[in-house]
Image: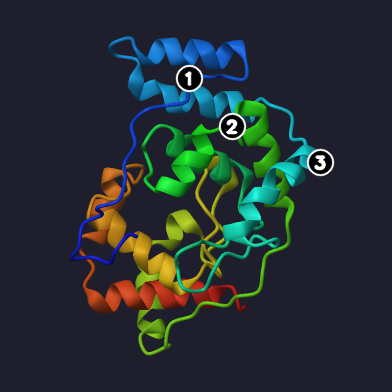
């Protein structure tokens, strides 16, 4: 299990990728992976493939059934911060994260196994399940902080974060910036610490540098404020 800042992740960080591809293009991506100089572009190649795939929500509903064991049938996750709320998240954000799990640009043993395994064998499967999840209604807000630093957190958020994530935390689908309003406080807090502690490889250097300026009050304040944006 991942721990908060001050402890390092000791879980698995598998680097191998599934050998079976659901289409010829994914086989090509697998071959390119072995070629020097191509690894950095593979996530973008697959991201583009998924974007171009049909958004089959009927198939996506079937594919999502095993995911409900952790994410819940409504995609609401868990308030303890172990599983995020993903319902109504932007399609582009969902597929970006799934592709990143496939290439160790994001770490979580469970999600890496799902993204690389038989449940999501090809670009069409990723597009289908992401399409279904993005169409789910936003779940109720169930994970908040104690409110002590939320007002200050709002000031910090509007000054440093709103230019990308939006004043209402709505994100930006076109640029794969996630909707974060109403996300569980504990999950947000964990992701902020993970970014600073180099446990989120897909965070940009600029993002990490910004968060490295945070102290305790900024971390808890911003996370609590963003979670409460879902109440508005």
> Within the image, what quadrant is residue 191 found in?
bottom left
Residue 222 place in picture, x, y as percent:
38, 73
Q: Nearer the viewer, residue 46 or 179?
A: 46
Q: Does dot 3 land on a helix, a strand or a loop?
A: helix
Say which of marks 3 and 2 sits in front. 2
Residue ID for mark 1: 19
Horizontally, is 10 left or right of 40 in the view? left
Mark found first going from the N terminus, 3 or 2 = 3
Say which of marks 3 and 1 sits in front. 1
10 Å neighbourhood of mark 3: few (<14), some, or many (≥20)? few
The answer to the question of whether label 3 and label 2 lie on touching residues, with beta carbons closer than 8 A, is no
Residue at image location 34% in from the left, 20% down from the top: 39
Residue at image location 61% in from the left, 27% down from the top: 123
The answer to the question of whether label 3 and label 1 lie on touching residues, with beta carbons closer than 8 A, is no
Q: Nearer the viewer, residue 168 or 49?
A: 49
Residue at image location 61% in from the left, 54% down from the top: 89
Mark found first going from the N terminus, 1 or 2 = 1
Residue ID for mark 3: 58
Residue 62 place in picture, x, y as percent:
75, 43
Against 10, residue 91 (above or below) is above
10 Å neighbourhood of mark 1: few (<14), some, or many (≥20)? few
């Amino acid at each position: 299990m991942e721990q908060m800042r001050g402890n390092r992740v000791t879980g698995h960080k598998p680097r191998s990728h599934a050998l079976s591809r659901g289409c010829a293009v994914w086989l090509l991506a697998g071959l390119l992976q072995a070629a020097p100089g191509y690894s950095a572009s593979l996530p973008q190649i697959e991201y583009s493939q998924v974007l171009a795939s049909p958004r089959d929500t009927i198939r996506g509903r079937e594919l999502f059934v095993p995911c409900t064991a952790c994410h819940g049938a409504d995609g609401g996750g868990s308030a303890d911060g172990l599983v995020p709320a993903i319902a109504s998240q932007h399609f582009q954000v969902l597929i970006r994260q799934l592709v990143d799990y496939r290439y160790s640009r994001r770490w979580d043993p469970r999600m890496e196994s799902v993204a690389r395994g038989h449940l999501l064998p090809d670009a069409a499967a990723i597009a289908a399940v992401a399409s279904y999840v993005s169409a789910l209604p936003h779940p109720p807000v169930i994970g908040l902080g104690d409110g002590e630093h939320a007002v200050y957190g709002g000031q910090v958020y509007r000054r440093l974060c709103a230019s990308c994530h939006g004043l209402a935390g709505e994100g930006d689908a076109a640029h794969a910036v996630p909707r974060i309003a109403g996300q569980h406080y504990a999950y947000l807090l964990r992701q902020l610490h993970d970014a600073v502690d180099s446990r989120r490889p897909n965070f940009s250097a600029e993002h990490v540098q910004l968060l490295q300026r945070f102290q305790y009050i900024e971390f808890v304040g911003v996370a609590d404020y963003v979670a409460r944006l879902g109440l508005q």
